[in-house]
């Protein structure tokens, strides 16, 4: 008999493809109770079928678009209704906006989808969580986040820099969460450059992602996520940034505790907490 009370419960956002799906499949295969969160219902259903086919386990499904903060609020409410405990929240959802764009909430798209949305979700679930693993990127070195203007990248827009700033925010959020919530284990990681649907709405980027010879598979990229979710906290640094299962020092701006504290307060105001 399958006793879910004795299994870890793992919520994976961005789980309908790429790193998220690879991680979810690995979690389910090792016996965890997996919850898949994705934006597109058809891809989410297909992801669930793949997890079921490969592992024999049926994941739970929740839909949310992280470019819509009300979707994130509904997701958090639905997860709270469904579960009194979440052992691991893998904040993996995110992408890059190739063209400058603003969300329905009025923020630059990258900073909302990659930072404000997971920041809001984590805060709304914080009392139910035991561990958070945030997908960051080495691109965080390409800019410096401005807590006084979270949409500053809309001026003189460069897609990779805007994406990098949003991922710098991810690393700052991870470290500040460890300081503010010491009981909750928080880690960030760089998955490498991955052959996924990343940037798939742009045909040039999508073609490059298919043919580039140096890209990692989603399964390889997901290894550090799964590893961080399962390691003894005593062997890890709370708030740390990891690359290939090793602690690494991020760019100096991403290690600034004053910047992290300012970003936290700005993010609280931005999402209405």
Image (cartoon, rainbow, N blue to C red):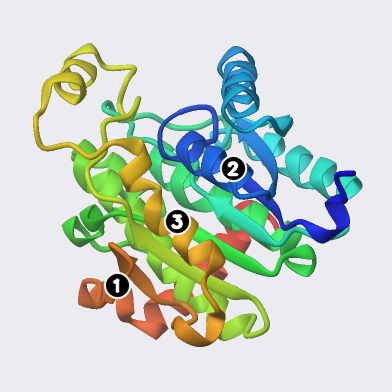
Residue 157 visible? The answer is no
Residue 248 found in image quarter: bottom left
Q: Which residue is mark 1?
A: 246
Q: CA distance from mark 1 to mark 3?
A: 12 Å
Give the mark nearer the N terminus: 2 vs 1.
Answer: 2
* Label 1 Cα neighbours within 10 Å, binned few <14 / some 14-19 / many ≥20: few
Which dot, 2 or 3, sits closer to the camera? 2
Q: Which quarter of the rendered picture does the C terminus lie within? A: bottom right
Secondary structure beneath disc 2?
Answer: helix
Residue annotated with mark 2: 29
* Residue receiving disc 3: 225
Q: Residue at x 68, y 83 (%)?
A: 183
Residue 92, above or below 165: above
Q: Which numbered disc flags the more N-terminal residue, 2 or 3? A: 2
Check whether the beta carbons of the residues at disc 2 and disc 1 lie within 8 A of each other.
no
Distance from Cα at disc 2 to Cα at disc 3: 15 Å
Label 2 – label 1 distance at C-alpha: 24 Å
Whole-percent x, y for residue 237 in the image: 44, 83
Q: Earlier in the sequence, mark 1 or mark 3?
A: 3
Query: Which residue is pictured at 69% across the width and 69% down the height?
Result: 130
Count neighbours of disc 3 (C-alpha within 10 A) and say few if under 14, some if 14 to 19, many if 20 or more: many
User: Which residue is depicted at the point 17% across and 36% down?
Assistant: 215
Specify the farthest residue to the front: 1
């Amino acid at each position: 008999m399958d006793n879910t009370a004795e299994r870890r419960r793992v919520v994976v956002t961005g789980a309908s493809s790429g790193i998220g799906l690879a991680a979810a499949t690995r979690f389910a295969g090792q016996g965890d109770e997996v919850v898949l969160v994705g934006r597109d219902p058809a891809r989410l259903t297909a992801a669930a079928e793949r997890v079921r086919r490969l592992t024999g386990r049926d994941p739970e499904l929740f839909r949310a678009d992280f470019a819509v903060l009300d979707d994130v609020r509904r997701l958090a409410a639905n997860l709270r209704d469904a579960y009194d405990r979440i052992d691991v929240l893998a904040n993996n959802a995110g992408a890059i906006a190739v063209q400058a764009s603003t969300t329905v909430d009025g923020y630059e798209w990258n900073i909302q989808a990659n930072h404000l949305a997971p920041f809001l979700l984590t805060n709304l679930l914080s009392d139910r969580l035991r561990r958070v693993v945030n997908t960051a990127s080495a691109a965080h070195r390409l800019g410096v986040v401005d807590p006084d203007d979270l949409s500053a990248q809309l001026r003189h827009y460069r897609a990779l820099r805007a994406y990098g700033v949003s991922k710098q925010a991810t690393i700052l959020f991870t470290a500040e969460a460890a300081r503010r919530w010491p009981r909750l284990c928080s880690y960030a990681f760089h998955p490498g450059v991955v052959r996924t649907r990343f940037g798939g709405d742009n045909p040039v980027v999508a073609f490059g992602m298919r043919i580039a010879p140096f890209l990692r598979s989603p399964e390889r990229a997901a290894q550090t996520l799964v590893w961080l979710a399962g390691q003894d906290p005593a062997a890890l640094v709370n708030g740390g940034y990891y690359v290939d299962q090793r602690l690494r020092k991020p760019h100096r701006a991403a290690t600034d505790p004053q910047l992290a504290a300012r970003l936290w307060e700005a993010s609280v105001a931005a999402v209405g907490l």
